[in-house]
Amino acid sequence: MTTPRIGLIGLGVISRFYLAALAHEAPAELAAVCDPDETGLAGAPPGVPRYRNHHELLRHADVDAVVVNVPNDLHYPVCRDALAAGRAVCVEKPLTTKLSDARHLARLSLDAGVPLFTSFHRRYNTEVNALRERIAAQAPISSLTVRYEEMIEEHAGQDRWYLDPDRCGGGCVADNGPNAFDLVRLFVGDVRVTEAAVHRDAHGVDRQATVLLGAASGAVARVELDWSYPGERKTIEARLADGTVHTADMLAGHPEFKGSLWHEYVGVLRDFTDVLAGRRTAGPPHGPDGLAALELVADTYAHERAGRSPSQQEATRP
């Protein structure tokens, strides 16, 4: 196909990485942008058509696909409308805030034959992929630990919806969980949640969580999430069956705040354009990868609810 024309829906804190990749690296053209905020639109590249809502963009913009970069609670309606309009979708994680909505999007994508791709940017991290190559020919993984820790107020910037459980879908489990769970699946395959401990603040936002998972191979995984961490730590530790331990620091070589995201989002858009060109699929046969990660998020919250009394559940309900 010719160079795909992409519309960017949502100009929040992550949009700069998409814009940079589209401008300098990705084999795609930015053909339209959309945001309800005039200030955000004013910062869009000159000459690119601007729209105030996604309905206008889908109706009037000449685009083959869209990148959905809106608050989490808006992922479902925007993706639904884009798929219904026949536009391929690359959506920020989580796919949706509700598992039922994600399953509906998966059905829409399959029925319409329109790709639904989730932006798991850590898949494209150089340190992550170096670790995968390093251990590929060695003993199998016996245990894996993924740490995803940060101070959310620093990362959210002006996007304060992160701290609203209804808009975010919860907290660190809903928002960082999909990236961490996707990394676990990348290394050990399909997994299921076996234990989960989730800690919420007075506003119902889950700020810390520890999730244990098991794989069919017998490997076990531990995911540590923290939204109150003083600084930032994003690491993977793989212990192999022969006792050796290998690690990856996803932030290594990127001292700038969020600096690793520049190259990771180039990878996201290159993969997405491969999907558009038919060189790869958007996910496994049973549905988009974003659905599998969201199922693990839902299972984590289910384990949390099972471990609380009814009064505790009511007191911490988002």
Image: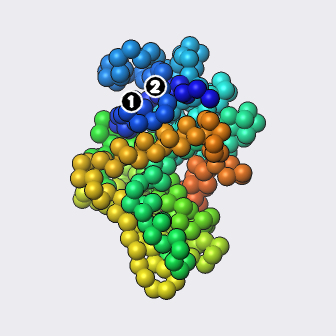
> What is the quadrant of the N terminus in the image?
top right
Side of 258 relative to 94 (left or right): left
Q: Which mark is residue 30?
A: 2
Residue 118 image offset from top left, x and y in percent: 55, 44
Quadrant housing residue 131: bottom left
Q: CA distance from mark 1 to mark 2?
A: 8 Å
- The type of residue carrying mark 1 is Ala
Q: Secondary structure at mark 1?
A: helix
Label 2 crowding class (10 Å Cα cut-off): few <14, some 14-19, many 20+? many
Q: Secondary structure at mark 2?
A: strand
142 shown above or below 90: below
Quarter assignment of residue 235? bottom left
What residue is shown with label 1?
A: 23
Q: Residues within 10 Å of mark 1 (few under 14, many from 20)?
A: some
Q: Nearer the viewer, residue 265 or 94?
A: 265
Q: Quadrant of residue 95?
A: top right
Residue lying at 33% horizontally and 50% vertically, measured from the top left: 260
Q: Nearer the viewer, residue 8 or 196?
A: 8
Q: Are marks 1 and 2 in contact (CB under 8 Å)?
A: yes
Residue 269: image x %, image y %? 49, 39
Q: Amino acid at mark 2?
A: Leu
